[in-house]
């Protein structure tokens, strides 16, 4: 038991939150003779930056010393001060006050800065009982734990947009909301122009699918680099490079695609798809990733890390972006025009063909998460892993390239046989991509800096 001859050292250690540099932590001492207020107001004992921590109230919470006579055993209480975004103790919102224990995690707001409460006692000859005489007793706080929130309303509670600031873009998905409004307005503006409407719908669905993967990866990559990867793949498809790929993989290698009236076995179809679709298209979509790697190597830091490929997460982000460019151009430039013309020739009504084309466009692009994005993102994982482990790079690249091509070929081959098998292959491809993302997040050298995701949580 802690007796009278003891010194009580307690700290609040800032362990997370925006503005905390990697590898640095701040400790704030707690006192046995006075309370410590946490907030943005300069008069607080723990002052948090007003621009960085907009979710923190001016006087957010307080830690109060608490003595339990007659042995002068000290403890501390955490109390919420009617903050706008709440105080959380070990993940549970706090109403009123609650006693702290060593290791407790305090969060100012659900996604705000976090503190760890640390408490240690060191025996000394000096007695600090004179400091604790005026402190409140634990019995006085027994009825104050988990009280209902006070009835008073702060200015930021009435006008929440004033206190959110940058959190709107970081945590409230403001950018996707803005783009949704823009695309809706553009769709209204293009009523009566089916081709323009199809392009707008395709780009929006592709953005939504990619944003889902981006959030899962949890690493920031400049938007212009990602768009550059998508445009790079689209430009390759429109260039003579595509003809060279077709000649090598479909003429020299056994990857010729079967005609509609040709009868072949499933095994032969799978082999052809492996060379003519899997190996060819996955290598084509990997070119922007390889280009980003070499461009990054030629640049000084920090542009080298921002643009280049230095870990599996970089490869996944660039690979899935490349797949978006491939899917958009393939769908809008090949599949939709073909089916639109075919239906229009059969029924003689162009509007019906446009409707069928739109029906084809939506599942093709939305399903790219389990299709082209899955294969390319999976191969991108191995490209980033090869950079991370250069001594085994060729072995890593071979496994990734062949497995991604196999998944691609399996999808194309089963598409003409059985819809249930197609579902199984799609789910399998999606699972491969998700497994690669999870492993990439665990291997990431910048793991502690990567933003947390809503879907999978921080890893």
Image (cartoon, rainbow, N blue to C red):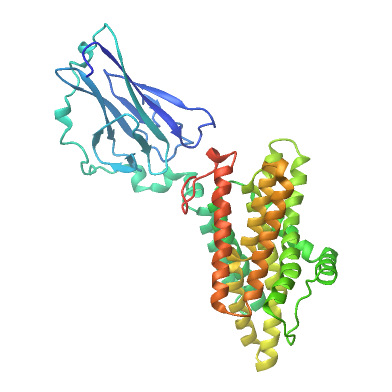
Q: Is residue 58 above or below residue 262?
A: above
In the depicted view, which residue is nearer to us: 196 or 153? 196
In the image, taking residue 272 as reference, residue 124 lies left or right, namely: left
Number of numbered discs: 0
Residue 127 in percent (x, y) is at 23, 9
Using the rendered image of the protein, determine whether residue 224 is visible from the camera's viewpoint.
no
In the image, taking residue 359 as reference, residue 92 lies left or right, namely: left
Q: Residue 63: which quarter of the image?
A: top left
Tell me what residue is drawn at x 24 percent, y 35 percent: 97
Q: Is residue 28 above or below residue 434?
A: above
Residue 9 in percent (x, y) is at 33, 19
Using the rendered image of the protein, determine whether residue 269 is visible from the camera's viewpoint.
yes
Tell me what residue is drawn at x 54 percent, y 72 percent: 423
Residue 144 in percent (x, y) is at 18, 36
Q: Is residue 238 above or below residue 108?
A: below
Tell me what residue is drawn at x 61 percent, y 72 percent: 364
Residue 217 in percent (x, y) is at 56, 50
In the image, taking residue 108 as reference, residue 283 lies left or right, namely: right
């Amino acid at each position: 038991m802690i007796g009278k001859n003891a010194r009580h050292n307690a700290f609040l250690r800032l362990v997370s939150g925006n503005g905390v540099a990697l590898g640095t932590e701040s400790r704030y001492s707690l006192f046995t003779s006075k309370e410590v207020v946490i907030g943005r107001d300069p008069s607080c004992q723990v002052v948090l930056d007003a621009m960085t921590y907009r979710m923190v109230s001016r006087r957010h919470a307080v830690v109060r010393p608490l003595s339990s006579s007659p042995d002068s055993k000290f403890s501390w209480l955490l109390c919420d001060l009617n903050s706008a975004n709440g105080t959380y103790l070990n993940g549970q919102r706090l109403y009123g006050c609650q006693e702290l224990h060593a290791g407790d995690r305090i969060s100012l707001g659900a996604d705000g800065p976090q503190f760890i409460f640390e408490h240690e006692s060191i025996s000394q000859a000096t007695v600090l009982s004179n400091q604790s005489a005026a402190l409140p007793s634990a019995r006085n706080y027994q009825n104050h734990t988990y009280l209902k929130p006070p009835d008073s309303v702060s200015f930021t509670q009435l006008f929440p947009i004033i206190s959110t600031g940058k959190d709107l873009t970081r945590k409230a998905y403001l950018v996707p909301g803005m783009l949704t409004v823009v695309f809706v307005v553009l769709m209204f503006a293009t009523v009566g122009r089916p081709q323009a409407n199809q392009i707008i719908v395709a780009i929006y669905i592709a953005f939504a699918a990619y944003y889902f993967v981006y959030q899962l990866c949890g690493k920031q990559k400049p938007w212009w680099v990602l768009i550059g990867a998508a445009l790079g793949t689209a430009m390759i498809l429109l260039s003579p490079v595509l003809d060279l790929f077709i000649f090598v993989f479909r003429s020299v290698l056994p990857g010729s695609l079967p005609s509609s009236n040709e009868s072949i076995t499933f095994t032969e179809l799978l082999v052809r798809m492996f060379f003519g679709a899997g190996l060819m298209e996955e290598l084509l979509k990997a070119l922007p990733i390889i280009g980003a790697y070499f461009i990054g190597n030629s640049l000084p830091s920090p542009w080298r890390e921002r643009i280049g490929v230095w870990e599996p997460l970089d490869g996944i982000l660039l690979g899935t972006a490349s797949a978006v460019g491939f899917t958009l151009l393939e769908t809008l430039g090949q599949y939709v025009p073909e089916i639109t013309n075919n239906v229009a020739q059969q029924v003689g009504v162009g509007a019906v063909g446009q409707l069928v084309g739109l029906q084809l466009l939506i599942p093709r692009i939305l399903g790219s998460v389990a299709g082209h994005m899955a294969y390319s993102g999976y191969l991108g994982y191995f490209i980033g892993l090869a950079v991370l482990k250069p001594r085994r790079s060729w072995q890593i690249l071979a496994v990734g390239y062949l497995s991604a091509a196999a998944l691609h070929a399996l999808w194309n081959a089963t598409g003409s046989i059985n819809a249930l098998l197609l579902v199984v292959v799609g789910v399998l491809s999606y699972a491969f991509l998700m497994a690669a993302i999870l492993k990439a997040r665990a291997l990431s050298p910048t793991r502690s800096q990567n933003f947390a995701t809503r879907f999978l949580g921080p890893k």
